[in-house]
Image: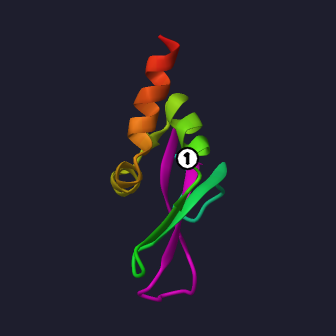
Amino acid sequence: MVKLRLKRCGRKQRATAIYRIVAIDVRCRREGRDLRKVGFYDPINNQTHLNVPAILSFLERGAQPTGTVHDISKKAGVFTQLSLNQTKFY
């Protein structure tokens, strides 16, 4: 199963970490090999950058976002685009 989760980047043991949002297999560890990078999140500066088409393609194929990634995506309006895409096909 594939999950959309945060992957920590930056220096070791630094409180101000930057996270990448990645699609990764659930059996891999947090810093493990990812399938695809789909965005990043900086909690200190409150910056996000999302590759929305890539996120939508993973969600349509059954990927499950973690709680934090779900909240970040919800603020960016990804789920409204997902529901619009699903209603187009039916």
The residue that appears at 51% across and 76% down in the rendered structure is 18
Is 6 in the magenta? yes
Location of residue 11 in the rendering, given as x and y in whole percent from the top left corner: 57, 87
* Quadrant in the rendering for residue 25: top right
Query: Which of 57 and 88 lies nearest the eye of the viewer?
Result: 88
The residue that appears at 39% across and 37% down in the rendered structure is 80
The secondary element bearing badge 1 is classed as helix
Location of residue 7 in the rendering, given as x and y in whole percent from the top left corner: 53, 64
The residue that appears at 59% across and 52% down in the rendered structure is 51
Q: Which residue is mark 1?
A: 52
The residue that appears at 44% across and 19% down in the rendered structure is 87
Residues drawn in magenta = 1-25
In the rendered view, tell whether residue 11 sits above or below residue 23: below
Is 57 in the magenta? no
Q: Amino acid at mark 1?
A: Val
Query: Which of 5 and 38 lies nearest the eye of the viewer?
Result: 38
Horizontally, is 36 left or right of 89 in the view? right
The answer, for residue 1, to whether it is visible in the render is no
Query: Which of 71 and 63 lies nearest the eye of the viewer?
Result: 71
The answer, for residue 57, to whether it is visible in the render is yes
Dot 1 crowding, Cα within 10 Å, few <14, some 14–19, many 20+:
some
Location of residue 48 in the rendering, given as x and y in whole percent from the top left corner: 48, 66
In the rendered view, tell whether residue 49 sits above or below residue 28: below
Location of residue 35 in the rendering, given as x and y in whole percent from the top left corner: 66, 48
* Quadrant in the rendering for residue 43: bottom left
Instruction: Give the main secondary structure, helix, strand or loop, of the magenta stretch.
Output: strand
